[in-house]
Amino acid sequence: MKNNIIKLGLILAAFAVVACASLAVVYQVTEPAIASQAQDALNSSLKELFPEATSHEDIKGAVSSSDETVKIEEAYLVKNDLAPLGVAIKATTASYKGPATVLIGVRLDRSITGVHILEMSDTPGLGANAASSTYYVDKAKKITFPGQFTGKYITDKFEVKTDVIPITAATVTSKAITKAVKVASASAGEYLQAMALGTAAPSAISGASQEAAQPAAEATSGASATSSGSATTQPAKPAAETTSGASQ
Amino acid sequence: MSEEGKDTRSFWQVFKAGLVFENPLLVLMIGLCSSLAVTSNVSNGIGMGLAMTFVLLFSEIFISAFRKLIPNGARLPIFIIIIAAFTTIVDLVMKAYFPDLSKSMGVFIPLIVVNCIIMGRVEAYSSKQRVVSSIADALGMGLGYTWVLIVISAVRELLGNGTFAGIQVMPVSYTPILFFILPPGGFLVFGLLISANNAIKRSINKRETLAAKQVSDQQKAKENA
């Protein structure tokens, strides 16, 4: 009896080893194709959001979500040569049957260039209509569910049934996608705000030099009184205060 | 394994049984969950049917070929390993080369592993039969599953969405009957198909008994003469 169990276990293990080995081979073959599919999908989505885009820069570390149920997966600063065009954010939130991933684009003027639903596993024919290119929430104008966000401003309400048309019989999905778009676009807005301040600072100093000069002078005089150990941090500190002074 | 319970039917007879008389969905009524869940459009129906047929075919071939090496005491876990391996292959291949289809089928491709049709056929048939009969059984059952899926999904997509395989077929003025896309619509269409299949079976049986009766009547007439 004992021998029999060991024998069965060994045979089972042999089958498992063969199965694992063959799966490893298939994985090796398909893995680059799956990765390039994902990369192609990202590139073409960015291109659709910003047709004039030529490059993008990863800015994930600089963008944070204001809502813990919406997770920012990826964030890109999309550029045409060196001029920034806007921000694209890939965000994930819980939808009806699992996570839904959306990609949104926000222009420098804070308008949404488009929303793409990259991944979702909601009910085919209902929630999955959110990702369908032939399902129109506005049949007369042929506007798809994600299509209706195009042209909205990030300061809009984003409320289902007031300014967002829901998908019939898929309220949970509609709300989840809308929330993801709202939170992600707000994050994009914050980044653009910070970027505008960062890049606007040199030109702002000349315009607001009178106001900016004083806190900066104070900061340096205050800092000079402290120990010289923090000398390396001093140049950054007044500069930060200069920008905040200019924004007011 | 003894060769006594060997299936003596021809390849074509075994294949045909899966299509109509022992159709896994309409007669055996196993594996219904995925078949109702994915059939809201035709491309899903075709994709699911073919993925299922692939897994069924290769699992049956493998298990039938190795049936003498698979010990009776550990057969179920071994079946599951083999089925899971082929399902994962289908899943990876679909993700790599048919990303749209893979996306729209979602979790139902990995769930083929626990589909009762495969487990049922492997346990009841291919673990006892020759490879050739197992191929016939797998193709019959797989295509029997596929055609039912295609019919259900065609009806549901046409009435529930006004399209066929994503192409608008119904006039624009047609208001889709959402009921057919929802789960109850799936059950309704499925029920109607079962009754249609029963009607087909009955008429075939009637014709065969009538033919048999005629033959016996003629023989009786001859005897009387």
Image (cartoon, coloured by chain):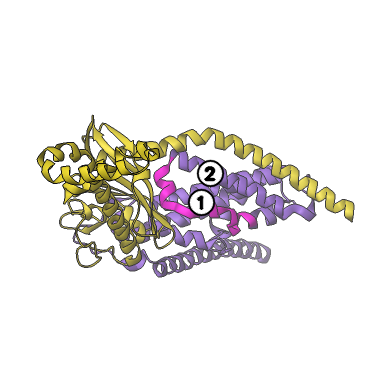
Residue B174: image quadrant is bottom left
The amino acid type found where label 2 is placed reads Val
Tell me which residue sits at (84%, 50%) in the image: A6
Q: Which residue is mark 1?
A: B109
Residue B65: image quadrant is top right
Q: Is residue A157 left or right of residue A206?
A: right
Name the tint of chain B in the rendering: purple
Residue A41 in sight in this render:
no
Label 1, label 2: how many angstroms apart (C-alpha)?
A: 8 Å
Q: Is residue A69 magenta?
A: no
Q: Position of residue B149 (x, y in %)?
A: 46, 56
Magenta span: B98-119
Residue A221 in sight in this render:
yes
The amino acid type found where label 1 is placed reads Ile
Chain letter of mark 1 equals B
Q: Position of residue B52 (x, y in %)?
A: 53, 50
Q: Is residue B103 left or right of residue A242?
A: right
Tell me which residue sits at (27%, 54%) in the image: A186
Q: Secondary structure at mark 1?
A: loop
Most extreme residue toward the front is A225
Name the tint of chain A in the rendering: yellow
Q: Which residue is mark 2?
A: B90
Ranked by sequence position, the earlier of labels 1 and 2 is 2
